[in-house]
Image (spheres, helix red, strand yellow):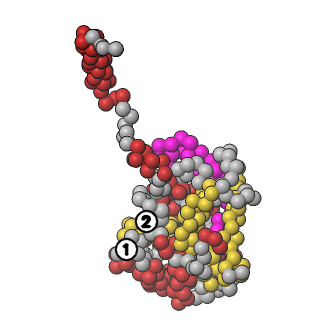
Amino acid sequence: MATHPAGILNRIADRKGRLELLVALIALLGPSSQPAGAQNCAECAISAAVETPVSASEWTISKQVNEVNVLFLASRGGKATGDLSQNDILVEDDGKPPAAILGFRTEHELPLRVGMVIDTSSSVNSRFRFEQAAASLFLRQVLQREDDLAFVMGFDNYSKVTQDFVHDANLLSQGVEKLHPDGGTALYDAVSRACQKLQHRPEQEMVARVLVVLSDGDNNAGDVSLEGAIDAAQRAEVTIYAISTNWNSERLSGDLGNKNLHRLSEQTGGRMLMPPNPKSVTKAFAKIGEELRSRYAVSYKPADFVSDGHYRKIRIQARKAGEKVQIRARKGYYASLASGINAESHGADSTVTMASR
């Protein structure tokens, strides 16, 4: 049936009016009607498939609340093993396998952040030159990657940074040379401050935070307790290696100092070494350097995770070529609400701090 020309014109006018109304509405609402960062379909698909990379500090304070990161050492026959793969390990969290393994890497892939903390109290006067030389050599040898960084801190009654974060081994050696023995021993204050320094340094990627403490383990000054120093290290995800300077000591204070150093290292997944004399300090540092490049980092989401603050045990087992591999790692963690500067720096009230104990 033929359509009257007037009817066609009316319908065209009607559609034009609706189109003009739509254009007017868009102009009125402006960009606010479109979500910020709107993407086309291809971009949306990519965004959904690829998760934002997790930075170093976000491995400590979980970006997704239930994400755990553990650094561990693997060894066979007393020697570090550097050839494990993800398929060689079994992880248990609170007695159950993780819901998902998110990442696995060797530590030689991770930039190092090393805090060299040296006891400068008057009790170390006689052997201090040996300690300085060994510490400088260690820093020269351990900072292998261009993005490895270290700082130097000495402590007596108070702690003092003589060289801030840097890769240059010459500057670090100069920082060690600036240290002079005098005064009391505020060991726990120094450990706590050094851990906070490692924790609060902004990072763009996952890093391995390590504190190397050279001391006799005595603590007769300062405000922080042994448990407070351990807690600071755990919250900062810092591994403590301690070298005792109690050479063949038969003093009661030497035994107590060694116990303090052992607890600091054991609770953070590190190790205490007891060289028999000052000249053996270099060998102790060499053992630490070997371990630092033989550790692994595994990241996972625990099964049935509830952010209720209770203690969750971590157990890591490994076998290579049918042979059991010894694992040394922190023994667990508390999941508790982040607070203070940590929560503010990430702007998320629902994040949790993973602190081992």
Query: Does 82 appear above or below 163?
Result: below
Q: Nearer the viewer, mark 2 or mark 1?
A: 1
Q: Can residue 93 be spotted in the picture?
A: yes
Q: Residue at coordinates 24% horizontally, 9% vertically from top-left?
A: 6
Residue range of the region highlighted in magenta in the rendering: 327-354
Q: Nearer the viewer, residue 90 or 180?
A: 90
Q: Residue at coordinates 58% horizontally, 48% vertically from top-left?
A: 65
Q: Is residue 330 magenta?
A: yes
Query: Does 345 appear above or below 59?
Result: above
Residue 46 in picture, x, y percent from top left: 43, 50
Q: Nearer the viewer, residue 91 or 131?
A: 91
Q: Is residue 27 left or right of residue 155?
A: left
- Residue on which disc 1 sits: 146
Q: Residue furthest right?
A: 95
Contact? badges 2 and 1 (CB < 8 Å): no
The C terminus appears in which quarter of the rendering?
Answer: bottom right
Residue 52 in picture, x, y percent from top left: 46, 52
Q: Is residue 277 magenta?
A: no
Amino acid type, callout 1: Glu
The N terminus appears in which quarter of the rendering?
Answer: top left
Mark 1, secondary structure of its residue = loop
